[in-house]
Image (cartoon, grey):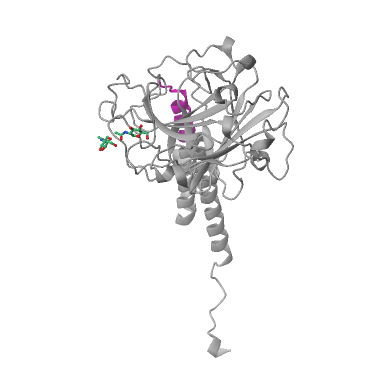
Amino acid sequence: MQTKKENKQRNRKKTSLEISCFTMLRVSLVLLVLSSVFIGWVNSHEESGEWSCDSDSEIRVQAEFKPGLVSLDGHADDWKDIDGFEFSLLPALDPDDDHEYKGGKMTVKALHDGRDVFFLLQVDGEYVYSKGENTKCPSVALMFQVGEDATYHNMGGCKEHSDSCTNKTCKGHEVDIMHFSIGNAIPGRLYGGNPIDNRDGNGNDKFGHLVDVYGWNPHCRYLDGIGPSGNDSSAQNDWKGAWWHSSFNVHSGFVEEDSPYASGGQKGTYYFEFSRPLRTMDRLQQDAQLTIGGLSKMSVAFWYPVDGNPWHGSGHYSINCDWVPLDISSGSSMLRKSGTGSSGDTASIFALLLSVVALCVSVFVGYRVFRPPSHHFTPMENL
Ligand SMILES: *[C@@H]1O[C@H](CO)[C@@H](O)[C@H](O)[C@H]1NC(C)=O
Ligand SMILES: *[C@@H]1O[C@H](CO)[C@@H](O)[C@H](O)[C@H]1NC(C)=O
């Protein structure tokens, strides 16, 4: 404040151009400072959910726009430049650290190409495979929020029982689930939506059991298109996917006779790769609709026949005890590359500051260079 007078005197000597430039600079500097203060405040605010769960507010899965990078074959080498998100696998029904999956953490990677979204799930595990017996093989599922009231806990959290849940009584609690059980799926081959099951208008996959399911709670789960109050033939299985284990030798392709594809008990990593269109033709509120630039909610489940014991439906591990935000990045948001939206905001205000500086410098230089005094304009005709 005490320097106001001095400033005024100095300013009077400057051109109006310079004054406005300095004002712009000062305004953007103030913006920069204010924004960092504001962002710090927003980050320290945490929301508490209904399901008592210590969910880390920082975790999220980010799907960046990376067209033409990955092939849907179960192999992970084409994903090597994509950052993954690492999660501990705790029992879904009792998320107790003591009962964490012993094999290791699960890495989840995601990207989109503007049309389809892709996921890679990667988890260490000794190779176990028992042809035709899904519960003696590892298995994975993805779950997404569809209805706004759908909680992570209890798979949508509708309070109705299996004989009373309908699309009316459980309205708003819809979750979308993709479940892949690999007992009949040849590694490296594509399963999921196929013309034969889609002709029947439901989310089944009678070949590899990579099914498209929806639900309102654990007791009310149905294939897309099938429902307690009638079937609708407009549904489809919108997912495709493949699996692989690092102990396999890569060659031209496995067939069913090659099962079990490798000897059991070998240490290694399982890979599960999936894709689905961001938007589907669902008209029944059975598919999550993903939006570029939008935030969705997802989760990942993992079943493993621990010590050779077949798993059961509710005995799965989960990557978190609540929804995990899924961020479908827009192709133009290069500034948000490093993750959180807030650092992107700071970056763009910093960029604004830089561009104001650049503008002022160039205007000032231009003003100095083209200052008129002695040169006169000579029309071409007069030469
Ligand atoms: C709906 O489809 C399922 C599976 O195909 C079938 O079992 C059920 O009877 C059908 N329900 C009606 C009402 O047609
Ligand atoms: C519930 O499902 C039935 C059968 O698919 C359908 O005819 C009906 O329109 C649905 N109702 C609502 C409210 O979505």
Q: Looking at this rendering, what residue extends furthest in the top direction? A: 98
Count of labels shown? 0
Q: Quadrant of residue 51?
A: top left
Residue at left offset 37%, top offset 33%: 146
In the rendered image, residue 12, in percent from the top left (x then y), is placed at: 46, 51
Q: Is residue 52 above or below residue 133?
A: above
Q: Is residue 284 above or below residue 93?
A: below
Q: Tell me: 156 left or right of 182.
A: left
Q: Tell me: 123 left or right of 154.
A: right
Residue at left offset 44%, top offset 40%: 237
- Whether residue 34 appears in magenta in the rendering, the answer is yes
On-image quarter of the C terminus: bottom right
On-image quarter of the N terminus: top left
Residue at left offset 68%, top offset 30%: 260
In the rendered image, residue 335, in percent from the top left (x then y), is placed at: 54, 43
Q: Is residue 40 above or below residue 74?
A: above
In the rendered image, residue 374, in percent from the top left (x then y), is placed at: 57, 74
Q: Quadrant of residue 255?
A: top right
- Whether residue 234 appears in magenta in the rendering, the answer is no
- Give the residues drawn in magenta, as a range: 33-47
Q: Looking at this rendering, what residue extends furthest in the front direction? A: 257
Residue 206 seen in this snapshot: yes
Q: Quadrant of residue 5?
A: top left
The one of 132 and 167 positioned closer to us in this rendering: 132
The one of 47 and 36 positioned closer to us in this rendering: 47
- State the predominant SS element of the stretch in magenta: helix
In the rendered image, residue 171, in percent from the top left (x then y), is placed at: 28, 29
The one of 59 and 222 positioned closer to us in this rendering: 222
Residue at left offset 44%, top offset 28%: 42
The one of 246 and 105 positioned closer to us in this rendering: 246
Residue 279 seen in this snapshot: no
Q: Is residue 261 above or below residue 331?
A: above
